[in-house]
Image (cartoon, rainbow, N blue to C red):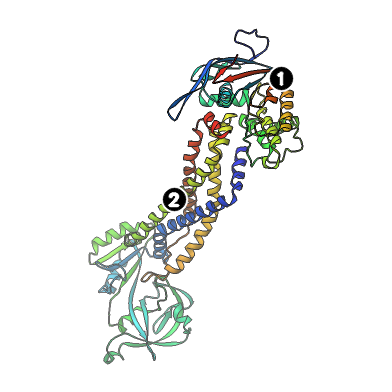
């Protein structure tokens, strides 16, 4: 991550310019993100930290084109995602962004292999091709022996690995993870950090929103949010 | 196809809920099928019965329907001759109907039809031969009661004892037949028309004439033309009689329409409720799927397939159940007074099955559409915020 004025040596994946996100909650105006500008380049591993309600998840959703800013602009891989329609943004996320959630959100009735295949099926990959890639990904995250298991049949850490494999299915340059260790114990969290570091070394840019200091310390860059603003 | 596999397995995730939904919709589907069979069944069955003997027109005394009253056609031979002289007419079968008593210790009532054995459409012989002079063809009820071909019975027209001798005849059973228009349990028999006319003191009379047309004639047009030339007679085509019967029995159709609509509403509510509960349980997952780029269309399709599978299973069970229930109801209604027992209330036709299945499937899929679209339009980020701790 570098400031907007920083030198460009690597491919720019995310550029946020004076992004604001406000919403109303029971009549009150909540300013979740207040004028944030940042950039994420290929190879970055950025941890967004901050207290609860500081706007970490909101910022992550904005960076991943899951949510739209109230004002400001967000460029993902050079595209102004704020100008895209709902379905165009969905397609963009499918092809360019990998997302990992605290609660995994795997489909319980599908096997690990099928869960990883899902985004590839949506992208239109042929069955053999997607099955082959899903197997490679599950092996990559250490679940080569658990491919035919359903989420209910594996541990929390393994579920999160399946979720990471699913996020990588369509070869996104950017992986966003919202509290990925929030449901995991300490040793499993450490394994998750190792996985993220390994993926990052392979070239995947990673942005995590986390309370987990161990995970944040393992990232290459850290950014602290307080009350919706970056604390210098 | 992966998303459809997901839909199918999702039904197994809550087997009790899915089973109850399938059973509920199956009952509604069975009711819909039965109502569709009932709605058109009487008409189809009545038409089939009236045309089964191959006579396209019915002639009765003016202002009456066949066997609707005790009125008879006078100058029956003359009327028959005049009708047979019509170029569009191939043959005329006169019928006289009357109640007679079987002589014995405890006289039994018997409905006897006087026919021209050479030209009749009232019965179908199952054994023996037609009732030429001195003979009688009996129905299954009498046959079951012990009468056989070759046996003799005495038949007497009801009336005073003074006339009893003149109005009694002894007949030999020549055949056993299925009487096409007999109601359930009715004892029927047929003798030669002149014999019955003599016994009942109704010379040259007929209750009804059945008319067969030459090939290629339009029964409605011929009936209209004949009515103009024979205003003293009521002449109706089978189609017109079916319409009259349909009007008289319209409450069956109204009942079928109301209950059929109720079954569709029940299906819609049941599937709508089940799918709403199921979709509400998965708001977080839906938001996550949308966040990772799964399109709204794919997710709505998955829910619709889920609903479709539920309805398909229910339709499979429901259509079978509907046929069984129709059979049971048919047994009860076959004793409906005054209607020929050959009339079927619930007539199975493949298109009724298809309509019932299509109705349930459409209602079910339509019901799932509303909660599915509502879930699709929920904001992703806000839903994820709410779902994540």
Most distant residue in the left direction = B231
The circle drawn on residue A203 is 1
Q: Camera-side residue: B244 or B251?
A: B251
Up-down relation of residue B273 to residue A41 (above or below): below
- Subunit that carries the residue with mark 2: B
Disc 2, SS? helix
Residue B155 horizontal/vertical position (percent): 37, 86
Alpha carbon distance from label 2 to label 1 = 57 Å
* Quadrant location, the C terminus of chain B: top right
The residue that appears at 55% across and 33% down in the rendered structure is: B287
The residue that appears at 32% across and 57% down in the rendered structure is: B220
The residue that appears at 59% across and 25% down in the rendered structure is: A51
Up-down relation of residue A92 to residue B4 (above or below): above
Up-down relation of residue A61 to residue A8 (above or below): below
Q: Camera-side residue: B216 or B327?
A: B327
Whether residue B1 is visible: no
Mark 2 highlights which residue? B264
């Amino acid at each position: 991550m570098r400031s907007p004025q920083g030198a460009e040596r690597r491919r720019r994946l995310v550029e946020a310019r004076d992004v604001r996100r406000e919403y109303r909650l029971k009549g009150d105006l909540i300013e979740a993100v207040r004028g944030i500008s940042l950039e994420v380049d290929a190879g970055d591993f950025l941890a967004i930290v901050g207290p609860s309600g500081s706007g970490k998840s909101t910022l992550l959703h904005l960076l991943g084109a899951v949510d739209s800013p109230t004002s400001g602009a967000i460029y993902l891989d050079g595209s102004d995602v704020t100008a895209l329609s709902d379905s165009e943004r969905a397609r963009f996320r499918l092809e360019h962004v990998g997302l990992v959630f605290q609660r995994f959100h795997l489909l319980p009735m599908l096997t690990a292999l099928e869960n990883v295949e899902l985004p590839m099926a949506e992208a239109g990959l042929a069955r053999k091709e997607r099955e082959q890639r899903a197997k490679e990904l599950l092996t990559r995250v250490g679940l080569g022996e658990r491919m035919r298991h359903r989420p209910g049949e594996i541990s929390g850490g393994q579920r999160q690995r399946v979720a990471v494999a699913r996020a990588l299915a369509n070869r996104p340059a950017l992986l966003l993870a919202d509290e990925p260790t929030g449901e995991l114990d300490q040793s499993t969290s450490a394994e998750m950090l190792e996985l993220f570091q390994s993926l990052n070394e392979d070239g995947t840019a990673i942005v995590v929103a986390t309370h987990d200091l161990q995970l944040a310390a393992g990232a290459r860059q850290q950014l602290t949010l307080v009350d919706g603003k970056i604390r210098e | 196809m992966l998303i459809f596999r997901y839909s199918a397995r999702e039904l197994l995730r809550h087997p009790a809920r899915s089973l109850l939904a399938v059973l509920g919709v199956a009952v509604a589907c069975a009711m819909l099928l039965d109502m569709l069979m009932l709605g058109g069944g009487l008409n189809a069955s009545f038409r089939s019965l009236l045309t089964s003997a191959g006579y396209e027109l019915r002639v009765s005394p003016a202002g009456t329907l066949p066997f609707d009253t005790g009125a008879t056609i006078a100058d029956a031979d003359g009327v028959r001759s005049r009708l047979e002289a019509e170029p569009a007419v191939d043959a005329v079968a006169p019928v006289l109907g009357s109640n007679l008593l079987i002589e014995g210790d405890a006289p039994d009532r018997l409905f006897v039809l006087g026919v021209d054995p050479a030209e009749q459409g009232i019965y179908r012989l199952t054994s023996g031969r037609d009732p030429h002079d001195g003979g009688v063809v009996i129905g299954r009820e009498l046959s079951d009661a012990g009468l056989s071909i070759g046996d003799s019975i005495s038949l007497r027209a009801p009336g005073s004892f003074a006339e009893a001798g003149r109005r009694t005849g002894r007949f030999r059973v020549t055949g056993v037949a299925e009487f096409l228009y007999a109601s359930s349990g009715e004892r029927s028999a047929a003798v030669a028309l002149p014999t019955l006319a003599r016994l009942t003191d109704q010379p040259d009379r007929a209750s009804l004439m059945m008319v067969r047309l030459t090939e290629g004639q339009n029964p409605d047009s011929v009936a209209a033309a004949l009515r103009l030339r024979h205003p003293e007679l009521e002449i109706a085509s089978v189609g017109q009689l079916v319409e009259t019967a349909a009007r008289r029995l319209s409450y069956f159709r109204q009942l079928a329409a109301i209950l059929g609509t109720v079954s569709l509403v029940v299906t819609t509510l049941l599937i709508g409720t089940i799918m709403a509960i199921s979709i509400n349980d998965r708001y977080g997952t839906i938001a996550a799927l949308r966040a990772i780029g799964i399109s709204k269309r794919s997710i709505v399709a998955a829910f619709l397939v889920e609903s479709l599978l539920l309805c398909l299973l229910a339709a499979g069970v429901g259509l079978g159940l509907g046929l069984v229930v129709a059979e049971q109801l048919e047994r009860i209604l076959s004793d409906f007074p005054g209607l020929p027992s050959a009339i079927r209330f619930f007539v199975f036709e493949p298109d009724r099955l298809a309509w019932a299945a299509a109705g349930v499937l459409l209602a079910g899929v339509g019901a799932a559409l509303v909660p599915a679209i509502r879930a699709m339009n929920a904001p992703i980020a806000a839903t994820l915020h709410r779902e994540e701790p």
